Image (cartoon, rainbow, N blue to C red):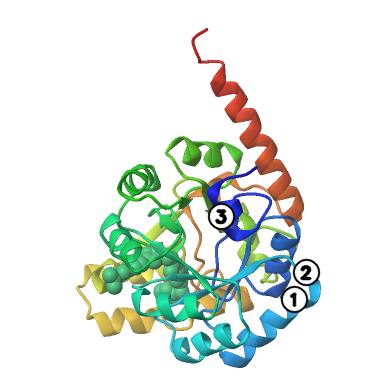
Amino acid sequence: MQTRVTDLLGIDYPILQGGMAWVSTAPLVAAVSKAGALGIIGAGGMDANELRENIHQVRAITEKPFGVNLMLLSPHINEQIEVVKEERVPIVTTGAGNPARLIDDFSKSGILTIPVVASVQLAKRLVRHGIQAIIAEGMESGGHIGEITTMCLVPQMVDALDIPVIAAGGIGDGRGMAAAFALGAEGVQIGTRFVCSNECQIHPFYKQAIIDSQDRSTIMTGMSTGHPVRCLKNKLTRKFEELESLRASREEIEALGSGRLRRAVCEGDVEEGSVMAGQISGLIHDIKPVSDIIQQMIEEFDNTIAQLTLFQKE
Ligand code: TUI
């Protein structure tokens, strides 16, 4: 499968594994890259040494391209920037902010910056800074999100930009991938589906919470703080709802969220922890190897496209 995205990134399939803080560490990333897609280390939550260690671990397993996702709100962001430059990481994706100041500097170090954005306005601004591809993330995604759905964001992004658009948010199988391509995307970024893989090194209760979920199992919290986050409904999200209904201060709401992702991912506390997951969670029913997820997605993509061509007039 060749698109501008596979050409640019040097991968076999136009699939990126979303960089997920605490979740996408070296074993998952290496498995995804080894299988011909792009694995991405989620640097959010890592200090400089942990990030360097993860980069070395990926390189010990595969020579294929991989990326690092920099969460721009991370307290370790400046040291992480130095590490990706020193380690000559080929691809950096960014999230939760405007990466304009990094693009030129990274480019001089041979690093390709692919921003994750949730609006056409920021995307256009970043194109003027010289980016070569962008990830358009809809609000179906897990974690920190914007306001627009993938269905509406992707075609508007495609029309506004000349660079390839990678669709993210609400895609968990080959049908979703085909839908994204129908909207003009040339690649997809997948998060939640890869969480439920054998190679993903998180507490089993987190994976099980996704498997047990249905279509209406996620909720957006933290809207009043300006940093809305999607996760599975649980005791913690009910506390958020209560605080927000009482119009609690931003500080109070942010304090409630502190350390909660780690608690869910590492300790398996899926009631008091933040179980970040996308709306596609309800579609995920099993845990399987990364290579099976990718192969089945490509097969399903091909079948979907073949089915759709039956609609063509003679
Ligand atoms: O970054 C993400 N998703 C994330 S980051 C994360 S870690 C976290 N932990 C605790 C609380 C909050 C986050 C979990 N999930 N996705 C990419 C993304 N970026 N979605 C939306 C944006 C975004 C938002 C605003 C990008 C740029 C932006 O720009 C604002 C500006 O400065 O113009």
Q: CA distance from mark 1 to mark 3?
A: 22 Å
Q: Residue at x 55, y 84 (%)?
A: 85
Towards the viewer: 79 or 164: 164
Q: Residue at x 63, y 78 (%)?
A: 266
Query: Picture coordinates of residue 123 (x, y %)?
Result: 33, 60
Query: Picture coordinates of residue 111 (x, y %)?
Result: 54, 74
Tags 1 and 2 touching, CB below 8 Å: yes
Residue type marked 1: Arg
Tags 3 and 2 touching, CB below 8 Å: no
Local SS, label 1 = helix
Q: CA distance from mark 1 to mark 2?
A: 5 Å
Q: Is mark 3 within 8 Å of ligand 1?
A: no
Q: Determine which residue is flagged by label 2.
A: 62
Q: Is residue 160 left or right of residue 269?
A: left
Q: Determine which residue is flagged by label 3.
A: 190
Res 83 → quadrant = bottom right
Q: Residue at x 28, y 66 (%)?
A: 223
Q: Quarter for ligand 1?
A: bottom left
Classify 10 Å Cα crowding around label 1: few (below 14), some (14-19), many (20 and above): some
Quadrant placement of the N terminus: top right
Whether residue 29 appears in this view of the structure is yes
Classify 10 Å Cα crowding around label 3: few (below 14), some (14-19), many (20 and above): many
